[in-house]
Amino acid sequence: MKKSSRPTLAHLANRVGVHSSTVSRALSNDPRVRATVSEDTVARVRRAAEQLGYIPNRVGSMLRTGRSRSIAVLVPHASEYVVGSVYEGLDAAAAELGYATFVANTFGDEQIRRERIDRLIEWGVDAILYADARVESEDLGQVDGVSCWPIIRRGRTDHRFHLDDELGGRLVARHLISNGYRSAAVIAGPSEASTFIDRVNGFLAEFVELGGYVDSRLIVASGLDIASGRKEFLRMLPNVQSGTAVFAAHDPLALGVYSAARSVGLHIGHDLGIVGFNDLEFSAQLPVSLTSVRWDFQALGRAVAFDVISAINGGNLESEIPSPKLIARQSTNCK
């Protein structure tokens, strides 16, 4: 073999003294396939592969098996913290199982999503995951024989990847009531996003049930950035009484409320309580630390990867999905 040539299964087979199909099974990432070869042979094949610098030919493998061992992930914006955290966990778990992952932005546009799906199918991915939490989005099921899995989907109690945002909202309500807040305002995030609808509905139902009051004028839809939080709070400010708590459905919105409150002389944690959602890194570092709801997004990503890859291979694994946890801090009078 010339030094510049790439080692193949045939080279490995010749080195070890077995058939190429034995080498292929010995190098399989599927333990059930590897089990058809003796442990000694597996060890000798893998040692030879390392010595020769063998790199599996995924194209050839795909032609033989019909599988690319790759998963695509469609997201609205890969730069968004939550999406990025889920993807990190998913990618790490997929790599452990011998799968590659690809991520593509849809920018929340249905047409772009359709185009991305068509292109990914051309590339031969084994599954397509999409983090699409819009109410009007339909479950894609299968497209041209490729499974499409929603990571987050509203109204699917049987969906193994459903995050319980409603419970997160209820945790906020219980915390505020237990800390003496009886009136609240809500900056709710996008009105078309099911995750935000669920967490706000959970909060409102629990807060009222426990004796709290929310003026309908103080429930407003919004964007997701700091500027939206500031703008919406200043807009509702004439109707906000002292001692009210603001539930901002995403931490950057809460940071906007901080900015607006301080600009008009309100003391956070005293004149005004504030609770966020998602517990982003900055939340604990603010001069008045922010009470927020925490998700383990990387654990969610890992659960998605394990379950989807199990399904691709004919299994039915159902990993445990993380539950929300309220982290109480100074913004709601908590030391």
Image (cartoon, rainbow, N blue to C red):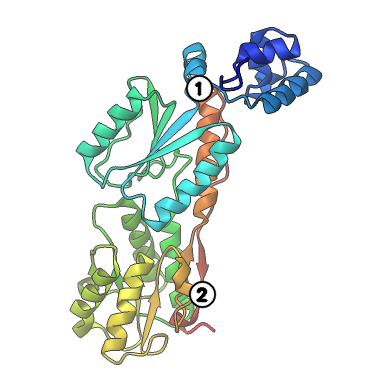
297 over 219 or under it: above or below: above
Q: Nearer the viewer, residue 53 or 229?
A: 53
**Element at label 1:** helix
* Amino acid type of the residue tagged 2 in the rendering: Ala
At a point 30% along the width and 28% down the height, the residue shown is 119
Image mark for residue 328? 2
Is any atom of residue 4 visible in this view?
A: yes
> Exactly how many numbered labels are in the figure?
2
- Indicate which disc, 1 or 2, sits on the residue closer to the N terminus: 1
How much space separates mark 1 and mark 2, taking CA atoms?
49 Å
Query: At 50% across and 67% down in the image, what residue appears?
Result: 326
- Give residue 98's position: percent from left, percent from top: 57, 31
Q: Quadrant of residue 167?
A: bottom left
Does 159 appear above or below 229? Answer: above
Dot in front, 1 or 2: 1
Which quarter of the figure has residue 14? top right
Q: Left or right: 40 with respect to 30?
A: right
x and y percentages locating residue 130 in the rendered image: 36, 39
Residue 234 versus residue 14 in the image, above or below: below
Q: Nearer the viewer, residue 99 or 136?
A: 99
| Within-10-Å neighbours for mark 1: few <14, some 14–19, many 20+ | few
Q: Residue furthest bottom?
A: 265
Q: What is the x, y in percent for residue 220? A: 23, 68
On screen, residue 176 versus residue 193, left or right, reads right
Residue named by callout 1: 58
Q: Which secondary structure lies at badge 2?
A: loop
